[in-house]
Image (cartoon, rainbow, N blue to C red):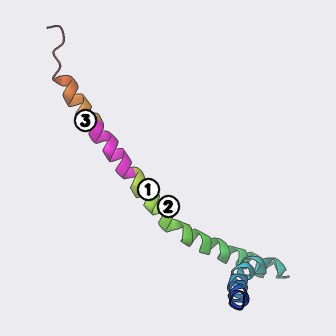
């Protein structure tokens, strides 16, 4: 019980800045500053998502290569079948 309170307090403190970063733009009164803040957030999110997209593209290319290899193997095996013997 004595350890639960400090752990909970540390968790609450560490989670607060992330939420504050996402919500701080809407409280900016000047429109150009607010839009610049939103643009920075958008750029940060895009930067976080880019590596995942690159990995996804690599995975997709590997899958296509594997499918082509499988198709080639099937076509080679079909060519060895005697038709009309």
* Helix, strand or loop status at disc 2: helix
Mark 1 or 3, nearer chain start: 1
Report the side of 80 relative to 9 (left or right).
left
User: What distance separates the C-alpha of mark 2 from that of mark 1?
Assistant: 6 Å
Q: Residue furthest top?
A: 84
- Which residue: 39% across, 57% down? 58
Q: Where does the image place residue 84, in percent across and percent down from the top left? A: 17, 7
Instruction: Provide the residue designation for mark 1.
Output: 57
Q: Earlier in the sequence, mark 2 or mark 3?
A: 2
Residue 36 occupies quadrant: bottom right
In this picture, residue 2 sits left or right of residue 69: right
Residue topped by disc 2:
53
Q: Are marks 1 and 3 in contact (CB under 8 Å)?
A: no
Q: Quadrant of the C terminus?
A: top left
Residue 20 sits in which quadrant? bottom right
Residues at marks 2 and 3 touching, judged by CB atoms closer than 8 Å: no
Residue 30 placement (x, y as % from top left): 83, 82
Indicate yes or no whether the magenta region holds residue 84.
no
Residue 65 magenta-highlighted: yes
**Mark 3 secondary-structure assignment:** helix
Residue 72 horizontal/vertical position (percent): 25, 35
Residue segment shown in magenta:
61-70
Q: Nearer the viewer, residue 32 or 72?
A: 72
Pick the residue in front: 13 or 27.
13
* Residue count near mark 2 (Cα–Cα under 10 Å), binned few <14, some 14–19, many ≥20: few
Q: Are marks 2 and 1 in contact (CB under 8 Å)?
A: yes
Above/below status of 44 relative to 84: below
Q: Which residue is mark 3?
A: 72
Count of numbered badges drawn on the protein = 3
The residue sitting at 69% across, 81% down in the picture is 15
Label 2 to label 3, Cα distance in Å?
29 Å
């Amino acid at each position: 019980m004595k350890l639960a309170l400090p752990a909970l307090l540390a968790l609450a403190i560490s989670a607060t800045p992330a939420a504050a970063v996402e919500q701080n733009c809407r409280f900016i009164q000047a429109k150009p500053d607010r839009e610049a803040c939103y643009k920075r957030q958008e750029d940060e999110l895009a930067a976080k998502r880019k590596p995942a997209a690159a990995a996804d593209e690599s995975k997709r290319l590997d899958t296509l290569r594997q499918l082509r290899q499988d198709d080639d193997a099937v076509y080679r095996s079909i060519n060895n079948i005697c038709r009309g013997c």
